[in-house]
Image: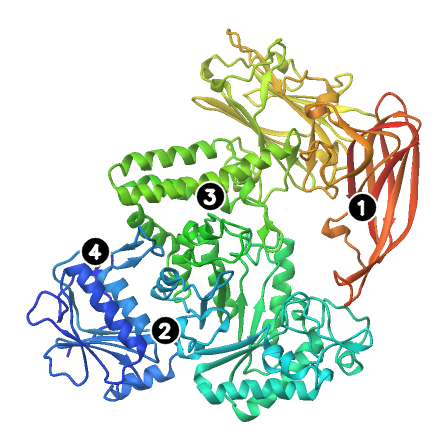
């Protein structure tokens, strides 16, 4: 028999070289032979192989049990069920990782053998994918099988041998949020076909009749019996059986033993220091191992899913580290007990498959605990941001997560992640490339793998909330597909995979949809916002901020629909994409824009901005854009004509403001640029004028005028003092249908420039061609009418809605609590009018201002006018951990501090006050008056 590693020329995975084994096209056809004592997974593998060979070629292969005298055989099985397996193959698979398989062909036999049950099933699926070109693109639905099976009359295979094992031991998709009795067969079947591991829902035994038939052949042996987690103690020490006779087994609160479940019915808090409780848990684990065997049992130590109710007895408290007790960190107590129980299990079963959660209140590194190297750490990474890579230093959330994860990696060489991506929720999120990068990071860090929560579309979801859950997996089918492949081989080319599967999925519409999804990925990957449980998705509402991106996506979809006309399946797939775009990108963006009203933002740039007049830096994808230009000096104030559409993008960094102006111009040859020297009469040219109004004490503002040739006029106003040099850096380009101005304003030279500041900004466009279209500005506001300039938030504000532009359905300012106060004015002229003895307050909840052991110096600035006095007060309170309290803490309200009183006048003035938030306190700011005050542009900055 000739031997070679499979490495042949393939088109869509179909072999095109000389053949030794005729799978189809010869007589008699080969026979599928399975062991007389075949595993259930082998029986399923035979069915799947026969079915897909028939779909591809029209030839149905029969299946028989060994022994067989058929001259040509396809032998399927496992190391345990194929006693005549050659010794070299047996040894290689025995030493291999779980789920490993080997494929071997000669002129008379095709062998697919797995290390254990289900591994041979993975082998058959790999064979179908890579040698027949089968692709399971998306989970099947009632009207779409989601698969691609190339038609071929003759299938031939070269002689050779292929060995494969997954890089990651853990590749799980675990059903959540749905009824366990309703098996999501389409979703689970798709997952296994693409190399994922599945488990029974919620660790319900596979012996449970509704689950047995479907799950048994798909369940890896090491997941046959899995238990623990939140029910670690309640399953071993059920309250109905033990509480009356042994209340000392349960949590001690307020001087007595009680049943406390924290809202999780029947899953209680226990006295985990009690040796008898530990013994019962150990016995439960050992009984499970005795029943199913070491290789078929996994157990994960955890506790009930609550933050409060921890036992307060002396023995439990003695397990905590020295220093103040905090109910949100019982990690040392928990892990001491876990290691003690694990030691007892290992004493009886040294190869037991045990793991422990690093979760929620016991995720911090425990003090003085030696972690058994045999035990896997199951790191629950809730709180991370999925908008940025885990190693992105610009993302504070991920910096914190990575720091803690690395500490666990120092403790254990066997760590895998419990991901919270899908519960964000993720809806139409094109993060395949980011996922590929992260999987390679996981490999480089030596992680064991990852587990995702599975929202299978054919599940029966529990509860009426979040009806979009059924769209999570269908709208992210590309992510699911490439992730499954990469968990076996992290070096696969993700772009090549995406090109292939999207081409197959969209058929004739593939070229247009390739452009469509490429744009979606560029928008996604270059948007600076965070997303992730438990704070939700701040990213999707901002994906279409870039001018023209919405129209371009819709144009690609329309092109795809034209290309696919007559193909009902592809048209239905395109209709889903259109719905996902409308529901999960366009609608959130529209809602965000409506809420933003007239307020503008200068988000922190996600990367370097090169001033070259090109505007192609990735950072500009995450900018805030406005195009609300109207005629400046006409009674109609009509919107700028579409042919002259003008858009301004805004970004910031620690010292600079960046602006990107795109001005459509149907007649670029007619552009007027007479001024050639700095500070000339540039406003007489075609030009863009920018007005910046920082919260400066002298109420001065700055004017920067730039013509399409890049000549600049800058001055301080009032007075148009052109001796001032702003230091602005400008580059421009004149193109066939527009001109572009890109500028960097060193804002720190104009005024103190800090995150959270609220500036005022205005833009205008001057057009000097011989037609009716002449002057345009934001909102048709006069160029020097500073009272109508829009507010501009620098970075992300420490105080929300300080310009009172965002109103709720009742017309009240969002994030503010008000009494005898109303928002007055329209558009950018909104301000809060506080009547006599009224007030308005807001608590400071930005993470950097949270209650902390460190004092935090802040500066409060605002504009105000009116009569009488305006009082600025500081609200003060402290939250103290209290395991018995409803929310896990007790709040102490301190006396309010009158920080300052200001005499008001009819003309608005800028006011400033400083305060140091004491250590151990939260703070809020409150405004009140004895007569009448008009308040605007409130900002808080951190010194």
Asked if residue 724 shows in the view, the reply is yes
Residues packed near mark 4 inside 10 Å, few (<14), some (14 to 19) or many (20 plus): some
Q: Which mark is residue 165?
A: 2
Q: Give the mark, 2 or 3, whose residue is nearer the N terminus.
A: 2
Using the numbered discs, state the Cα–Cα distance from disc 3 to disc 4 in whole angstroms.
32 Å
Residue 313 percent across, percent down from the top left: 79, 80
Using the numbered discs, state the Cα–Cα distance from disc 2 to disc 4 in whole angstroms.
26 Å
- Residue beneath disc 1: 943
Q: Nearer the viewer, residue 865 or 619?
A: 865
Q: Nearer the viewer, residue 426 or 914?
A: 426
Q: Which mark is residue 3?
A: none
- Residue beneath disc 3: 522
Residue 829 percent across, percent down from the top left: 73, 24
- Residue beneath disc 4: 150
Residues at circles 2 and 3 in contact by the CB criterion of under 8 Å: no
Q: Give the mark, 3 or 4, whose residue is nearer the N terminus.
A: 4
Choose mark 2 or mark 4, whichever is in front. 4
Residues packed near mark 2 inside 10 Å, few (<14), some (14 to 19) or many (20 plus): many
Of the 4 image quadrants, the one containing the N terminus is: bottom left
Up the image or down, 357 lies above or below 526; here it is: below
Choose mark 1 or mark 2, whichever is in front. 2
Q: Give the mark, 1 or 2, whose residue is nearer the N terminus.
A: 2
Choose mark 3 or mark 4, whichever is in front. 4
Q: Nearer the viewer, residue 450 or 677?
A: 450
- Indicate left or right for 57 with 167 as reference: left
């Amino acid at each position: 028999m000739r031997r070679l590693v499979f490495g042949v020329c393939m088109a869509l995975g179909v072999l095109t070289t000389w053949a030794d084994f005729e799978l189809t096209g010869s007589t008699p056809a080969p026979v599928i032979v399975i062991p007389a004592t075949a595993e259930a997974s082998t029986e399923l593998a035979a069915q799947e192989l026969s079915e897909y060979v028939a779909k591809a070629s029209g030839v149905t292969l029969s299946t028989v049990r060994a022994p067989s005298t058929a001259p040509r055989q396809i032998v399927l099985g496992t190391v345990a069920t194929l006693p005549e397996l050659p010794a070299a193959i047996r040894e290689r698979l025995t030493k291999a990782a779980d789920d490993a398989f080997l494929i071997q062909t000669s002129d008379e036999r095709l062998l697919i053998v797995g290390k254990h049950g289900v591994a041979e099933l993975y082998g058959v699926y790999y064979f179908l994918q890579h040698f027949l070109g089968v692709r399971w693109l998306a989970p099947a639905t009632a009207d779409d099988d989601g698969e691609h099976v190339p038609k071929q009359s003759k299938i031939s295979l070269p002689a050779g041998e292929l060995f494969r094992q997954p890089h990651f031991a853990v590749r799980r998709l675990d059903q959540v949020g749905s009824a366990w009795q309703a098996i999501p067969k389409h979703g689970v079947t798709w997952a296994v076909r693409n190399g994922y591991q599945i488990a029974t829902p919620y660790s319900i035994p596979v012996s449970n009749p509704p689950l047995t038939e479907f799950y048994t052949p798909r369940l890896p042996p090491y997941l046959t019996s899995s238990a623990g987690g939140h029910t670690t103690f309640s399953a071993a020490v059920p309250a109905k059986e033990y509480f009356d006779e042994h209340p000392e087994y349960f949590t001690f609160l307020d001087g007595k033993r009680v049943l406390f479940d924290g809202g999780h019915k029947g899953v209680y808090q226990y006295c985990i220091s009690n040796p008898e409780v530990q013994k019962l848990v150990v016995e439960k684990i050992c009984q499970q191992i005795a029943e199913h065997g070491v290789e078929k049992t996994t157990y994960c130590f955890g506790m009930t899913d609550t933050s409060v109710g921890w036992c307060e007895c002396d023995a439990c408290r003695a397990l905590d580290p020295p220093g103040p007790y905090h109910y949100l960190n019982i990690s040392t107590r928990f892990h001491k007990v876990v290691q003690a129980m694990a030691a007892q299990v290992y004493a009886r079963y040294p190869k037991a498959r045990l793991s422990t959660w690093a979760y929620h209140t016991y995720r911090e590194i425990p003090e003085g605990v030696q972690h058994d190297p045999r035990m896997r750490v199951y790191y629950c990474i809730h709180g991370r941001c999925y908008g940025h890579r885990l190693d992105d230093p610009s993302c504070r959330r991920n910096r914190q997560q990575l720091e803690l994860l690395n500490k666990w990696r120092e403790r254990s060489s066997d760590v895998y992640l419990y991901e919270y991506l899908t519960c964000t929720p993720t809806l139409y999120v094109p993060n395949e490339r980011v996922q590929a990068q992260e999987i390679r990071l996981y490999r480089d860090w030596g992680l064991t793998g990852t587990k995702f929560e599975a929202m299978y579309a054919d599940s029966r979801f529990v509860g009426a909330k979040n009806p979009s859950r059924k769209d999570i997996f269908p709208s992210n089918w590309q992510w699911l597909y490439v992730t499954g492949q990469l968990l076996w081989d992290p070096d696969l080319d993700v772009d090549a995979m995406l090109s292939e599967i999207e081409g197959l999925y969209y058929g004739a519409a593939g070229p247009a949809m390739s452009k469509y999804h490429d744009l979606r990925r560029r928008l996604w990957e270059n948007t600076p916002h965070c997303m992730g449980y438990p704070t939700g998705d701040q990213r999707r509402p901002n994906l279409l901020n870039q001018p023209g991106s919405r129209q371009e996506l819709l144009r690609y979809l329309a092109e795809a629909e034209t290309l696919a006309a007559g193909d009902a399946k592809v048209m239905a797939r395109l209709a889903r994409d259109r719905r996902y775009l409308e529901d999960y990108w366009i609608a959130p963006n529209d809602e965000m824009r409506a809420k933003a009203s007239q307020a503008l933002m200068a988000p922190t740039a996600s990367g370097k901005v090169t001033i070259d007049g090109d505007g192609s830096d990735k950072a500009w994808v995450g900018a805030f854009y406005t195009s609300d230009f109207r005629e400046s000096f006409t009674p109609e104030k009509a919107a700028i004509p579409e042919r002259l559409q003008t858009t301004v993008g805004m970004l910031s960094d620690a010292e600079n403001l960046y602006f990107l102006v795109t001005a459509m111009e149907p007649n670029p040859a007619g552009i007027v640029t007479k001024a050639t020297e700095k500070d000339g009469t540039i406003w007489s040219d075609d030009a863009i004028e920018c007005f910046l109004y920082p919260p400066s004490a002298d109420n001065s503002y700055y004017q920067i005028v730039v013509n399409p040739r890049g000549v600049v006029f800058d001055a301080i106003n009032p007075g148009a003092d052109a001796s001032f040099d702003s230091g602005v850096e400008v580059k421009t380009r004149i193109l066939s249908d527009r001109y572009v101005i890109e500028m960097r304003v060193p804002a720190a030279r104009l005024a103190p420039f800090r995150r959270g500041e609220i500036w005022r900004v205005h833009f205008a466009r001057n057009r000097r061609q011989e037609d009716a279209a002449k002057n345009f500005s934001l909102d048709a506001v006069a160029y020097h009418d500073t009272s109508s300039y829009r507010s501009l938030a620098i970075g992300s504000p420490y105080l929300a809605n300080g310009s009172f532009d965002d109103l709720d359905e009742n017309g009240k300012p969002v994030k503010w609590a008000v009494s005898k106060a109303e928002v007055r004015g329209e558009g950018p002229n909104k301000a809060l009018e506080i009547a006599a003895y009224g007030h308005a307050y807001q608590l400071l909840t930005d993470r950097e201002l949270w209650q902390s052991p460190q004092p935090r110096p802040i500066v409060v600035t605002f504009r105000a006018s009116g009569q009488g006095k305006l009082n600025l007060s500081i609200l003060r309170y402290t939250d103290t951990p209290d395991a018995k309290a409803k929310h896990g803490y007790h709040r102490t309200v301190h006396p309010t501090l009158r920080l300052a009183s200001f005499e008001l006048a009819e003309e608005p003035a800028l006011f400033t006050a400083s305060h140091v938030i004491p250590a151990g306190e939260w703070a809020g700011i409150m405004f009140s008056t004895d007569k009448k005050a008009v308040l605007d542009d409130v900002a808080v900055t951190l010194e």
